[in-house]
Amino acid sequence: MLRPTDNADAPVPKKPTMNEIAVACGVSQATVSLVLNHAPGTRISPTTRDLVLQKAAELGYHVAHRVAGRRPVIAMLINDVTSSPHVAGLIDGVAEAANEAGYLVSLVPTAGDDETEQSAIGFLSSLPVAGVIYTRLVTQEVVVPPGLTDWPCILLNCYVERDRIPSVVPGDQAAGLTAVLSLLDAGHRRIAYIGGEDSIEASRERLKGYKRALATRDVPFDPALVVKGGWTIAGGYMALKRLLKFPDPPTAVFCFCDRTAVGVYNAAVEAGLVIGRDLSVIGFDNEAYTADMLPPLTTMELPHVDMARHAVEELVAMINHQKTPSRPARLKFDCQMIQRQSVSPLPVPGHRRETV
């Protein structure tokens, strides 16, 4: 029988952690991670770097051997990856641009939960993270979690109060202006806006663009022509049914999203109207099915891929040059109009005309 050694019950020495080093140095855990993983382009002073390395040595912290040629990481924190087709553009744009720049992407879905985001930041501290892209699926103002800006950081499809962190967002107001101006230039004056909920920033911004377009052409704003349709097919259907009861119904409709436009199509057909002849319609989002609608839907395209690629390019510049970009803190990307057959000139009373 083997006899137990005298120190068999002695506690096993605990391996020091990055958090312990951070507390000892009076810095964040993310800063310790950046130093110990030798992440490139970090904005850490030589004094802080030396302090972290010295304290790590004193505590007996050993950095695991890194594989030669291992790429630095760009972390992408996003609140949702399942509920919308738009997420693909954001993720693909980041992944492609990061790969081209020589970075790997670590995608971390958080459901927008504060605790999950804090856990994610702790997890990222164990990786050779060079920078972070903080993302929202729906454009909105956010409050970023503590510790996020210990890395070079840029916001994608969201922004913070007073634009203290660089951000990239779509130009929803300009898109609304473009869409409604195109209808006005086609001769329409009774133009409805079937919007989303007031709580959605994109809906509010597109309504501002709608109003600006009317004012630009000296067309009076009629609040009765603004109807909430949410972002559903049923919402668009019910909204147009309501609008068609007016003595002077609209001849054109600008929709908050393409799903709303599908509902508008259904209600128009039920009423015996021909889209692109009796009623012009513009959607928003350029979802895959819009080119196959009858007639194909004119729509505004969200520039998610371009926004994501630009966010990576700016983040890489921040990492390499260790400075914030010299531009307005919130950069708005134009939404392109995809012109199809759902819009045509206002018909002359008493005359039929062909669709375009």
Image: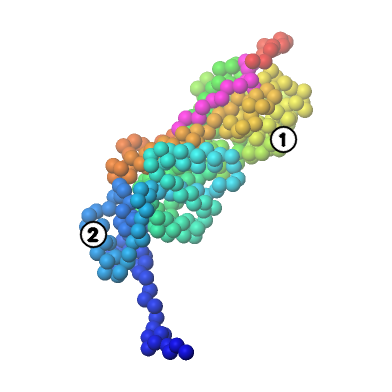
Precedes in sequence: disc 2 or disc 1: 2
Q: Is residue 207 above or below residue 47?
A: above
**Is any atom of residue 72 visible in this view?**
no
Q: Which mark is residue 298?
A: none
> Which of 64/298 is in front?
64
Q: What residue is drawn where x is 42% and y is 41%?
A: 98
Question: Label 1's element?
Answer: helix
Q: Nearer the viewer, residue 313 or 188?
A: 313
Horizontal and vertical percent for residue 356?
64, 15
The outermost residue toward the front is: 1
Q: CA distance from mark 2 to mark 1?
A: 66 Å
Q: Position of residue 332 (x, y in %)?
A: 44, 34
Rendered residue at 60%/16% (across/down): 187
Residues at circles 2 and 1 in contact by the CB criterion of under 8 Å: no
Image coords of residue 155 (percent x, y): 43, 44
**Displayed quadrant of residue 62:** bottom left
First to last magenta residue range: 333-346
Up-down: is 266 above or below 56? above
Image quadrant in which you'd find residue 21 = bottom left
Residue type at mark 2: give it.
Answer: Asp
Q: Where is residue 279 shown, x and y percent of the image?
A: 68, 22
Within-10-Å neighbours for mark 1: few <14, some 14–19, many 20+? some
Vertical side of 219 occupied by 10: above or below: below
Q: Which residue is mark 1?
A: 238
Image-based side of 337 in relation to 351, left or right: left
**Rendered image: mark on residue 50:** 2
Mark 2 Cα within 10 Å, few/some/many (few <14, many 20+)? Answer: few
Q: Amino acid at mark 1?
A: Met
